[in-house]
Image: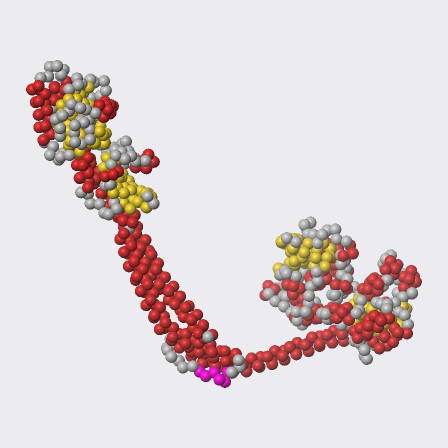
């Protein structure tokens, strides 16, 4: 069923594709052709209908012209004018008969006017001259005559077409006629004020009018009406409409222009309305053609197009079914092959037969090639996994080696630095003190090198994380200036800093790593500058909500860097002067570490330099703005060991006189504190004991975790300083057992880890094991004392006044 479903799906996709590239264009072309044809036919039919309407109006105008010509002839004949203008008393019977004969003779010349019913001339004296279908003119319709006379007087000698009107001759067989009238004046055609001499009325037969227009070629459903200026229908295809009155609104649309057309819905059917106005009588010829009649040819086009499209689609469908077998079947075989491969049945999958020399054949061929190479790729994958395991093992070995190296180097370094400090506290000659100071500085340099290598290794391994704690930017800069003042004073160069006013006072970020970057840049700038000075400027680079990016600029007037060496200045173990006779020391890791730290802080670092004129290092770093009113206790200046980061060594000796606190007050307050020191290294034991005793603490020493637990079970101590790596039982296991024992026996003794394990995560492991604090070796006396003071506020208050 799965294969059947897949076949149908592919088939329909194929049909859809064919439809898109063939049927859809055909549909589009058919629809476009239909629309073009519709527009063309509609336009042509509308134009044809309009032309027919104009032709009918032309005939109407011709009829009007014939009648008006007749009226003009009658009005211009001298005999008729004389009779009309005479006093009826003097007109004898002979004259009257002659006049009527004269009218008949004139009428006989208008052979086209077969529809004339009668001609009547009324004199001003009341005489009537009549030629028509009846000789009985005694009974007149006075109301109709009055309307005609009033209209003729208003026209002042012009012909008036009144449309349908009652026949004034009541005896005539045509009760309704088309009436044209004209007032006869003394001098016909002159303006108002002239004396009228008579009234000429011509009545035309409605049936004759209808007979002509009925001969016009009208398609089924097409109708026509003639409307007089009073909106009355003079003629209509449907004779029941004759005499009816058009609505004022519809008539208004017909009188907007002389000729035109529009589409109107009449009796619920869209109807094409064309109209033309007679300039002689203001009568309107209006044709009504249903849109269905106009668009009848389009139906044939539509049905033919639809049939062709359906036939095309059927052919495409049958063709697709036939072709799909050669397309879908190989694909199904390939899918079944992949499914067996996924189930691990590679051996059961055989190469497929290539059925065609097209893309499907190429696909089948490539599937066969895939089968042949799959075993090799699987083997390569196995080898890659093995290599990955070897690399991971090597990485673990590297991390273990780095941790061991850190511990093994820091342990003796703690002893060396501590012992050098203790020796310096003794009475020495100037020469001896100079030697010891040199050795102490060398030890500090070695510690700096160790810190750089460890930081670089942690960054390379992706194990260095940044902290986000509040700190104050200006005290940090002040501290850096003071810390490097000794170096700049010795070289007689200036060191200054300028912080823009819009730089926030407090920020969230990693102060320790920012200090490390600036320390590296300060150190390099001072080292390579012999005259002039070093300047730090800090400004705002970008603000995005609560996030702010600062721009730091460290400029010096030193030796500068050659242009060809600028590109590699931030690479590991690279210095601007790498010659064996270089005057300046260093590992070349400072700028590399700074560059990596800047990257972790969401910024970038670059340098501009000119040989002999100095260098300017720029870097940006992103921080979060902190409120200006943060409590002082939250500000980490100098950084606390609680950040989990090893504090950077200051240029002064870690055990210098400035870091040792001398007070008889502090000694007396500290004497009550009994500290248990768990340390296996003899040298470190001596250093720690001597320094703690100098600050008034009582110290008991044990060499491993077993002895520490035993000592804690026999005697009460205020604090434990616990090394981690010790024989028999390490510090982590010892503190875990101590905490378990405290759960049953009650109480809690503070334990501070004091260890050479300073890798990423070592502090966290110590705290997780149950320790309360962490100090890395080589330790600074003030940091160790700060950790101890945290558990004994009264001691901290006693030390508050000490330098």
Q: Is residue 261 above or below residue 171?
A: below
Magenta includes 348?
yes
Query: Foreground: 647 or 119?
Result: 119
How many numbered markers are drawn? 0
Magenta includes 13?
no
The reply, left or right, for residue 603 in relation to residue 692 is: left
Q: Is residue 411 above or below residue 476?
A: below
Give the residue drawn at x 82%, y 64%: 787
Locate residue 240, reporting x and y percent: 25, 38
Locate residue 406, reporting x and y percent: 74, 73
Give the residue drawn at x 65%, y 59%: 621
Give the residue drawn at x 90%, y 61%: 666
Give the residue drawn at x 81%, y 68%: 752
Viewport quadrant of the C terminus: bottom right
Query: Foreground: 690 or 242?
Result: 242
The answer to whether one can see residue 577 in this image is no
Query: Foreground: 347 or 428?
Result: 347
The answer to whether one can see residue 787 in this image is yes
Where on the picture, by quarter, is residue 550?
A: bottom right
Instruction: Magenta stretch: give its range.
Output: 346-351
Locate residue 760, reporting x and y percent: 71, 69
């Amino acid at each position: 069923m799965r294969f059947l479903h897949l076949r149908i799906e592919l088939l329909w996709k194929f049909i859809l594709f064919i439809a898109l590239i063939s049927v859809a264009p055909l549909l589009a072309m058919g629809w476009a052709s239909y629309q073009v044809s519709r527009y063309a036919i509609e336009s042509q039919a509308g134009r044809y209908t309009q032309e027919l309407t104009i032709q009918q109006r032309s005939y109407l105008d011709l009829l009007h012209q014939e009648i008006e010509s007749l009226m003009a002839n009658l009005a211009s004949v001298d005999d008729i004018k004389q009779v009309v203008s005479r006093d009826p008393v003097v007109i004898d019977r002979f004259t009257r008969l002659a006049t009527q004969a004269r009218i008949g003779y004139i009428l006989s010349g208008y052979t086209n006017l077969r529809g004339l019913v009668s001609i009547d001339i009324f004199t001003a004296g009341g005489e009537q001259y009549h030629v028509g279908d009846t000789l009985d003119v005694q009974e007149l319709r006075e109301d109709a005559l009055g309307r005609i006379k009033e209209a003729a007087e208003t026209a002042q000698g012009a012909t008036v077409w009144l449309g349908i009107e009652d026949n004034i001759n009541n005896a005539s067989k045509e009760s309704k006629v088309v009436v044209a009238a004209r007032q006869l004046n003394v001098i016909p055609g002159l303006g108002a004020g002239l004396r009228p001499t008579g009234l000429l009325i011509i009545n035309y037969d409605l049936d004759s009018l209808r007979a002509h227009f009925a001969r016009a070629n009208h398609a089924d459903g097409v109708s026509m009406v003639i409307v007089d200026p009073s909106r009355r229908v003079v003629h209509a295809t449907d004779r029941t409409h004759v005499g009816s009155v058009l609505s004022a609104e519809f008539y208004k649309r017909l009188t907007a222009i002389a000729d035109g057309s529009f589409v109107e819905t009449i009796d619920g059917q869209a109807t094409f309305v064309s109209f033309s106005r007679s300039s002689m009588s203001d009568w309107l010829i209006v044709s009504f053609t249903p849109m269905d009649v106009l668009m009848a040819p389009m139906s044939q086009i539509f049905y033919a197009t639809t049939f062709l499209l359906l036939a095309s689609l059927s052919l495409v469908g049958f063709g697709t079914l036939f072709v799909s077998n050669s397309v879908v079947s190989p694909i199904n075989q390939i899918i079944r092959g992949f499914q067996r491969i996924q189930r691990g049945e590679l051996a059961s999958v055989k190469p497929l037969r290539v059925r065609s020399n097209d893309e499907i054949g190429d696909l089948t061929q490539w599937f066969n090639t895939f089968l042949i190479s799959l075993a090799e790729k699987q083997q390569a994958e196995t080898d890659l996994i093995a290599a990955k395991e070897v690399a991971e093992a090597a990485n673990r070995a590297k991390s273990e080696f780095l941790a061991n190296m850190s511990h093994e180097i820091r342990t003796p370094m703690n002893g060396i630095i501590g012992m050098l400090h203790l020796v310096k506290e003794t009475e020495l000659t100037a020469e001896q003190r100079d030697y010891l100071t040199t050795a102490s500085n060398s030890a500090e340099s070695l510690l700096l090198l160790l810190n750089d290598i460890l930081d670089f290794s942690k960054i390379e391994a992706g194990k260095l994380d940044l902290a986000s704690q509040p700190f104050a930017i200006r005290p940090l800069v002040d501290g850096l200036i003071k810390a490097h003042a000794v170096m700049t004073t010795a070289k007689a160069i200036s060191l200054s800093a300028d912080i823009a006013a819009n730089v926030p006072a407090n920020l969230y970020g990693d102060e320790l790593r920012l200090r490390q970057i600036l320390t590296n840049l300060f150190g390099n700038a001072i080292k390579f500058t012999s005259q002039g000075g070093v300047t730090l400027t800090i400004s705002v680079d970008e603000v995005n909500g609560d996030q702010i990016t600062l721009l730091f600029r460290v400029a010096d007037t030193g030796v500068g860097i050659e242009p060809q060496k600028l590109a590699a200045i931030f690479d590991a173990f690279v210095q601007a002067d790498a010659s064996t006779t270089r005057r300046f020391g260093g590992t070349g890791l400072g700028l590399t570490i700074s560059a990596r730290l800047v990257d972790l802080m969401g910024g970038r670092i670059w340098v501009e330099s000119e040989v002999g004129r100095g260098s300017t290092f720029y870097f940006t770093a992103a921080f979060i703005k902190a409120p200006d009113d943060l409590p002082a206790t939250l500000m980490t200046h100098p950084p606390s060991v609680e950040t989990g980061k090893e504090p950077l060594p200051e240029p002064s000796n870690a055990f210098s006189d400035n870091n040792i606190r001398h007070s008889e007050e502090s000694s007396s307050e500290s004497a009550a504190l009994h500290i248990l020191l768990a340390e296996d290294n003899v040298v470190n034991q001596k250093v720690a004991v001597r320094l703690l005793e100098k600050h008034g603490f009582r110290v008991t020493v044990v060499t491993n975790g077993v002895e520490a637990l035993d000592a804690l079970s026999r005697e009460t101590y205020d604090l434990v300083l616990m090394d981690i790596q010790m024989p028999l039982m390490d510090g982590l296991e010892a503190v875990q057992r101590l905490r378990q024992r405290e759960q049953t026996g009650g109480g809690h003794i503070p334990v501070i880890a004091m260890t050479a394990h300073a890798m990423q995560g070592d502090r966290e492991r110590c705290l997780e094991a149950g320790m309360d604090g962490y100090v890395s070796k080589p330790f600074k006396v003030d940091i160790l004392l700060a950790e101890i003071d945290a558990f004994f506020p009264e001691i901290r208050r006693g030390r508050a006044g000490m330098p």
